[in-house]
Image (cartoon, grey):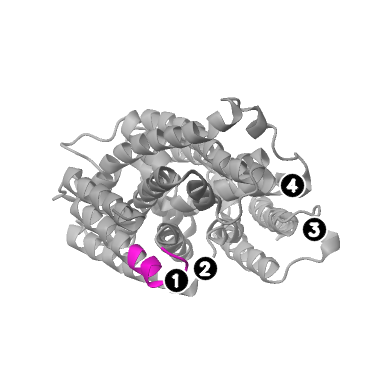
Amino acid sequence: MSISLLQWALVLASSVTLFFVSPLSRTAPEFFRGARQERTPNTVFLTSSLVISWLFAKSITNAANLGQSFGLVGGVAYAGYYLSFLVAGLVIVAMRNQGGYRSIHQFLESKYGAGAVVVFTLLIIIRLYNEIWSNTIVIGSYFGEQGTTHYYVAIVVFSLLTLAYTLKGGMSSSIMTDVIQLSLFVGLLTVILGFILPQYGGSLQPLLSSGTWTLGHGVDLLLVALVQCFSYPFHDPVLTDRGFITDTRTTLRSYLWAGAIGSGCIIFFSFVGIFAKLNGLSGEAPVAVARYFGVPMLLLMNLIMVTSASSTLDSAMASFSKLISIDLSKAAEPSVSRGRWAMVVLTVLGTVPVFFNPAILSATTISGTLVLGLAPVFLFWHVPVPRLAFHLSVVGGLVLGGLLTLFPLPYALQLGSGKYGALLSTNLITSAYCFGVFGLCTLLRKNPSNG
């Protein structure tokens, strides 16, 4: 049997299995909140769902590629984004306990009005839209070169198979399959490391000592991640929706565990790229290392990408479905049928960019820059401010971050000479603006006579 047929067998077998184990959701609580027999997800289920929904195919590919470029520094830099779990968990639990809010949209509408909800909704739709194409192109790369027929067919078939089991159960399907997918991911990662570590006598030293901890060799990206983690999680409904489906104690515990487990998985997967760096392998790190070890490793790598991509796609579909059917709907009872149609629309539209050969890392770094204005809005959710503060921070940050991304700063204003020096400067300047205008609005509200 050819390698291609074995790869297709893995994709089909895993997708069909997930379809049969997915529960059929008939009611709105089951479809939109993952409740089963009136019970909400426990810590194990919620933690698993949080972790695997952020171990995107694009994320582990980025982690490996950054390990290939910068050694251990690259893996740690990308793992910095997983501090988002800590930030989101603490803020969401505080909003629920102290503010009594039941969703992000309820908070925004009650404090900042309908206009803020519209702006925020556009941001998260773009986020969910990006999640589709940025993960499926990783799957396609294992079946053919970008732009080939095999590449496109793999993407379309994989997207439809994932859509099928997600339509069946919605959030219930997503959470149920997430436990299976995380277990499989950890198992596969362990086996992959079992190929790599014996190459160094079982010692981690060559991997841990790789890279240089300087601004120009990956530390600049780590600083970008640390800046963005205060805003990045709040434009991802896949992450925030799960903060409102069970009790706050379980929620906080799950978010803290998810941050630790997720960052660990990212750092360990970056070892794949570090191995490529130490052995002079070129091209996409996961593919290059898989080919180095031969067919068994290629199939393992293919399966771990399928696992991580499908978990992200089903979560994105479930969140978009909830957004359309609950957050933006005024209906007394959310429609499961409407939720299913929303999933279909997202899948179709999210596949379109695949045909324009986009870059996967940009889906994280650029979108993270454009939403920096969300940081003061959520970190200081309890502070009384005029509604204008939201728009000055979020819309102003979107415009400023976008302009500085399109028209990079002069070299003299960039921090360091590294690849991400300009991005770091852009993030710091934009963040300073966002916190500055939000703080100014706070001061003006306290001292209206000065306005």
Q: Decide if residue 329 is in sight here.
A: no
Labels 4 and 3: the sequence-earlier one: 4
Q: Which residue is mark 2?
A: 358
Q: Which residue is mark 1?
A: 353
Q: Amino acid at mark 3?
A: Gln
Q: Amino acid at mark 1?
A: Pro
Tell me whether the residue at label 2 lies in contact with that at label 1, contact meaning CB atoms closer than 8 angstroms.
Answer: yes
Q: Which one is in front, 222 or 298?
A: 298
Vertical comparison of 324 with 285: above or below: below
Q: Which one is in front, 446 or 249?
A: 249
**Which numbered mark, 3 or 1, is in the foreground of this view?**
1
Q: Position of residue 390 (x, y in %)?
A: 56, 59
Q: Amino acid at mark 4?
A: His
Question: Dot 4 surroundings within 10 Å: few (below 14), some, or many (20 or more)?
Answer: many
In the rendered structure, the answer to whether residue 230 lies left or right of residue 174 reads right
Q: Secondary structure at mark 2?
A: loop
Labels 2 and 1: the sequence-earlier one: 1
Q: Which residue is mark 4?
A: 217
Q: Secondary structure at mark 3?
A: loop
Labels 2 and 4: the sequence-earlier one: 4
Q: Which residue is mark 3?
A: 414
The stretch in magenta equals 144-154
Q: Amino acid at mark 2?
A: Pro
